[in-house]
Image (spheres, grey):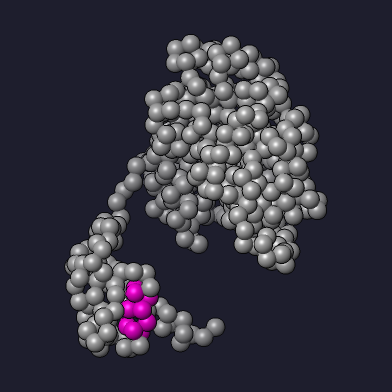
Amino acid sequence: MDVSSTANGGQTARVVAAIRQRISARALSPGARLPSIRSFARTMGVSTSTVVEAYERLVAEGLIQSRPGSGFYVTRVPQPLALAEIGPRLERAVDPFWVSRQSLEAGGDVLKPGCGWLPASWMPEAELRKALRRFARAEAGHLVDYGTPLGHPSLRRLLSLRMSEHGVVAPADQILLTESGTQAIDMLCRLLVEPGDTVLVDDPCYFNFLALLRAHRVKIVGVPWTPSGPDLTAFAAALGEHRPRLYITNSGLHNPTGAMLSPATAHRLLSLSGEAGLTIIEDDIFGDFCEEPAPRLAALDGLDRVIQIGSFSKTLTAAARCGYIAARPEWIERLSDLKIATTFGGNPVSADLVHAILRDGSYRRHLNGLRDRLARARGDVASRLRALEIRPWIEPRGGIFLWCQLPDGLDGAEFARRALAEDVVLAPGNVFSVSQSCAAFMRFNVAQCADERVFAVLKRAIAAATV
């Protein structure tokens, strides 16, 4: 590594940051002239070439403009006021965005037992690189053209075969590829609900369901979740009282609890939903983590009122997003039009990457090793949590999560704030709960708990909270 080059890069970044801060704080208003290169170099204690490079970067970003013979000026288009850059970092509410925000923004030294994905070292890097090299040799049109509205035909046929292994009959023309599972739910909400409609979710449920549904301005009603699925008495009562349009759930492996829907609950759930004319979105994103067969609502329903979605972000890669929707033909046709209106075409790069890994058998081998590794991690992490009096709600039969009850009297949000102060991101229970009844719970990602510091921080947080 060229040390001098690295040092100069750091100095340039410091100059850039200083100018950005002045612009954000309105110390330099639109149209204001920046200090001359020589004077600012003296102010910052750097070379003139460093200031020149910094100014050129800011010109490229559109923050400043060069006027030959006159100098550099702040652009006349006002920049948004960035409060985070002119004062101390604001405390953000522990809401459905909290865990995602902290996990996605975390630096390399931050531990993330609260996040919802696997460590990079657990993913099939060699297979991904091989598939990317193969794609790079594709014909020019394949590299630059839009994808078709339904998406990569060969991948859809392969997905149809994979889904049939779980009893879901979904021909390729009843499958539409999306950028992600989140986009799939967003598209379905655009298609199926209007602002003010009622949508049922599990309580607790995946926190981004709540964030996304609030963006669609619907009324969210939670149904208590049990180790075998939703509480059917509460589910029936919600149908009668609220007349919901939609129910969103996980059935293979539930997020955050890791529970599996029982066959008896699945049948009764579909019976109640059919009588009420309720549409169900079954998110099967964690289905590939299942270590034993699990009921799929889409299989029992025949894709009549149940829509199944999924993606490969959790098992393969989150960098090349690829998800899918399987639904009845008339809904797929309308979703295809919606996809054209909102994204125009699919993402052939991501789809081709996923297809290449699925078709050569490497994905199955990866999953087999992953399930074994996760089983060992769940046992180890559960044991270490119990030693701290953090008790798993159930023993999941697959997956990456342990849903745990904290020691008596501890509040998950406060617990998470204490841990964050020591660079550990946790997932407090109430971010998953519509009713805010899960304050004493926490979701742990066992794959992200390998570092000893996680348990040391947990122990200190418990001690601090019980003083």
Residue 458: where, in percent of width, then height? 48, 46
Q: Quadrant of the N terminus?
A: bottom right
Residue 307: where, in percent of width, then height? 62, 29
Our reading of the magenta stretch's main secondary structure is helix
Viewed as shown, does residue 268 lie left or right of 26?
Answer: right
Residue 60: where, in percent of width, then height? 38, 73
Viewed as shown, does residue 318 lie left or right of 63?
Answer: right
Towards the viewer: 178 or 392: 178
Q: Quadrant of the C terminus?
A: top left
Q: Residue at x 37, y 82 (%)?
A: 53
Is residue 327 something one can see in this rendering?
yes
Q: Is residue 165 above or below residue 50?
A: above
Does the magenta segment cover residue 265?
no
- In which image quadrant can residue 221 be found? top left
Residue 258: where, in percent of width, then height? 61, 34
Question: In the rendered structure, which segment of residues is drawn in magenta?
Answer: 50-59
Is residue 380 something one can see in this rendering?
no
Does the magenta segment cover residue 52?
yes
Q: Is residue 216 above or below residue 139?
A: above
Q: Is residue 145 above or below residue 51?
A: above
Q: Is residue 123 above or below residue 161?
A: below
Q: Residue at x 40, y 28 (%)?
A: 195
Q: Residue at x 62, y 29 (%)?
A: 330
